[in-house]
Image: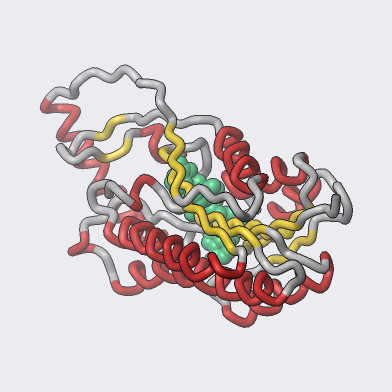
Amino acid sequence: MAVKTAIITGASSGIGRASAIALSEAGWNVVLIARRVNELRETQQLCKRPDRDPLVLPGDVTDEEFVVKSFQLAFSTFGRIDLLFNNAGISPGANPIEYTSLEEFRQVLDVNLVGPFLCTREAVKIFKGQQPAGGRIINNGSLSAHVPRPHSVPYSTTKHAILGLTKCTALDGRSNNITCTQIDIGNAESAMTGKFDAGALQPDGRLIPEPRMNVQHVANTVVHIASLPNDVTMLEVNIIGYAIRRTRIKSRLTLEISIKYMVYRHGKIKRNIGQV
Ligand SMILES: NC(=O)c1ccc[n+]([C@@H]2O[C@H](COP(=O)([O-])OP(=O)(O)OC[C@H]3O[C@@H](n4cnc5c(N)ncnc54)[C@H](OP(=O)(O)O)[C@@H]3O)[C@@H](O)[C@H]2O)c1
């Protein structure tokens, strides 16, 4: 059977890296996209080579020219694209809307929504044009696509919007053998969720450490979805770190410390905006 090819965005770390490795171990050729070249090369080293070397394409998913050229190069290298995992994303952390700049909002919108739009568009062009036509897209949503965290307007807005992109892609793709799945994850271990060790902000103002599962469980789920034939789909899948972490209800003093920590973080977030 011909070796299938997957494009994974955000393959330089976390879920994207783990999924690229798992797909390559399952016999897929992989195309690795993200901005950090050294980290992408590390992922490349960790991937198997079922057919050809993993193709490393360093760049920004918000850059239209980069995305168009990358998909063309992936197609001309492997002759066919079977899967796009729209995984690249950023989460700037809790920030009340009154402190959220338009720049911050647009940045999250660009990476988490415009990027998947551009990649989906280029993938669909290839899926429709190749013989036999078809392909699969997996969008990395979040539980925040359904239930927002406090003070997460940019992130939760984009993740809710991804659900629309998923449903439209699945509906419009059906007649061309194109499927689209959204995977909604509740806390896998990655750089993005490392900050939850100090506690994630809850609606009542408390910071509570939340369970995080090994990222491998997400990668295995991606491989399972990817392995389905294109006449079968899973529209929405959620996977959740389920272990309960015991915490004591915080006293008034620790609550005040939590709030001070939040204020401190707001300052940091405003200074660090632009970094992942
Ligand atoms: N971890 C969780 O529990 C969890 C839960 C729900 C949803 N998610 C979603 O899972 C996805 C991956 O997150 P993660 O947890 O694996 O965090 P991560 O380790 O921080 O991974 C984020 C990835 O996105 C890439 N990226 C960011 N901006 C990019 C851009 N402009 N162009 C290209 N690549 C870009 C990063 O690579 P570069 O910095 O090298 O560009 C990195 O590889 C995100 O969409 C996130 O919203 C994660």
**Residue at point 49% right, 62% down?**
170
Residue 33 spot, x, y in % from top left: 66, 62
> In front: 82, or 244?
82
- Indicate whether 266 appears above or below 201: below
**Residue at point 73% right, 76% down?**
72
Report the colour scheme: secondary structure
- Indicate whether 209 appears above or below 91: above
> In front: 195, or 181?
181
Q: Is 212 left, or right, of 98 in this rendering?
A: right
Q: Is 186 left, or right, of 264 in this rendering?
A: right
Residue 223 spot, x, y in % from top left: 65, 42
Outermost residue, right side: 51
Q: Is 22 left, or right, of 200 in this rendering?
A: right
**Residue at point 30% right, 73% down?**
102
Residue 114 spot, x, y in % from top left: 47, 72
> In front: 270, or 188?
188
Q: Is 25 left, or right, of 148 in this rendering?
A: right
Outermost residue, bottom side: 65
Tell me the quarter of the picture where residue 256 sits. top left
Tell me the quarter of the picture where residue 6 sits. bottom right
**Is residue 49 among the parts visible in the rendering?**
yes
> In front: 274, or 118?
118
**Is residue 115 among the parts visible in the rendering?**
no
**Residue at point 68% right, 73% down?**
126
